Image (cartoon, grey):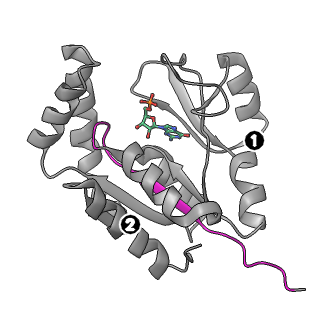
């Protein structure tokens, strides 16, 4: 028997509103069981419809900080300066990588930097909008956010876009289908096989 080749980490970032989750869901489907999504932990409250253990591991602040102190996170970060913490637990990635699976992390730019510092062979992909105007249009069309929240997300997006060139690959999400094809091609070129 041969031991499976260890899997790789795939880090995907991009401004909120760029359509990351839609693209990521389709990429995961394309690769079946070979690529799995890491479920992040967060201290923010669940939004309507979000389920614990499915969308996020929703943790109380004390529990999050206890795990952080115990070294259970591959990376963790306070996002948006609102006091909400987000992080990737080693338990979400370690066992899958050892079993030869690839694991996709959908995390922010600061988290991505932390991952690369620890796992230099990670594949990093930045999904970007056509333009900031297009991103603003998408954020408004979701209709879920107040003006202040939209402005805050646009500020974060401006800062994130400025860091896009730190990623190995940049993909423009003008159509979902093209962005999905492009990401699948990148992953295949980096050694991930189709089912
Ligand atoms: P939301 O609260 O809208 O689900 O996510 C807000 C932001 O947190 C997004 O930019 C998302 O990429 C980022 N995020 C989600 N999970 C993690 C994580 O585990 N680590 C880091 N660093 N960022 C995360």
Magenta-highlighted residues: 2-18
Looking at the image, residue 139 lies above or below residue 60: below
- Residue to which mark 1 is pinned: 71
Give the x, y percent position of residue 83: 49, 19
- If the image is split into quadrants, where does the N terminus sit? bottom right
The quadrant holding residue 154 is top left
- Residue under the image location 68 percent in, 26 percent down: 64
At mark 1, the secondary structure is loop
Q: In this image, 92 relative to 159: left or right?
A: right
* Residue at disc 1, CB closer than 8 Å to ligand 1: no
Tag count in the figure? 2
Task: Note whether 77 is above or below 127 in the view shown.
Answer: above
| Nearer the observer, 131 or 178 | 178
How would you classify the magenta stretch by its main secondary structure?
A: loop
- Which mark lies nearer to you, 2 or 1? 2
Q: Position of residue 152 (x, y in %)?
A: 25, 24
Position of 96 compared to 76: left or right? right
Label 2 C-beta lies within 8 Å of the nearest ligand 1 atom:
no
Q: Secondary structure at mark 2?
A: helix
Q: Tell me the quadrant of the picture where the C terminus can be found.
A: bottom right
Picture coordinates of residue 123, whole percent (x, y): 49, 67
Tell me: 181 left or right of 53.
left
Q: Residue at x 20, y 49 (%)?
A: 129
Q: Quadrant of residue 168?
A: bottom left
User: Mark 2 or mark 1, which has the lower sequence index?
Assistant: 1
Name the residue that disc number 2 marks.
Answer: 183
């Amino acid at each position: 028997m041969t031991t499976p080749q260890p899997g790789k980490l795939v880090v995907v970032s991009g401004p909120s509103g760029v359509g990351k989750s839609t693209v990521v869901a389709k990429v995961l489907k394309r690769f079946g069981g070979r690529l799995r999504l890491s479920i992040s932990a967060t201290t923010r409250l669940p939004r309507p419809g979000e389920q614990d253990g499915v969308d996020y591991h929703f943790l109380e602040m004390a529990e999050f900080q206890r795990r952080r102190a115990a070294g259970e996170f591959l990376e963790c970060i306070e996002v948006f300066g609102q006091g909400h913490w987000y992080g990737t637990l080693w338990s979400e990635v370690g066992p899958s990588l050892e079993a030869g699976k690839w694991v996709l992390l959908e995390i922010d730019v600061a988290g991505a930097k932390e991952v690369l510092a620890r796992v230099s062979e990670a594949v990093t992909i930045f999904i970007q909008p056509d333009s900031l105007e297009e991103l603003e249009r998408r954020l408004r069309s979701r209709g879920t956010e107040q003006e202040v929240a939209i402005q805050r997300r646009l500020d974060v997006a401006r800062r994130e876009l400025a860091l896009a060139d730190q990623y190995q690959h940049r993909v423009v999400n003008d159509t979902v289908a093209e962005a999905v094809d492009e990401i699948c091609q990148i992953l295949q070129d980096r050694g991930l096989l189709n089912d």
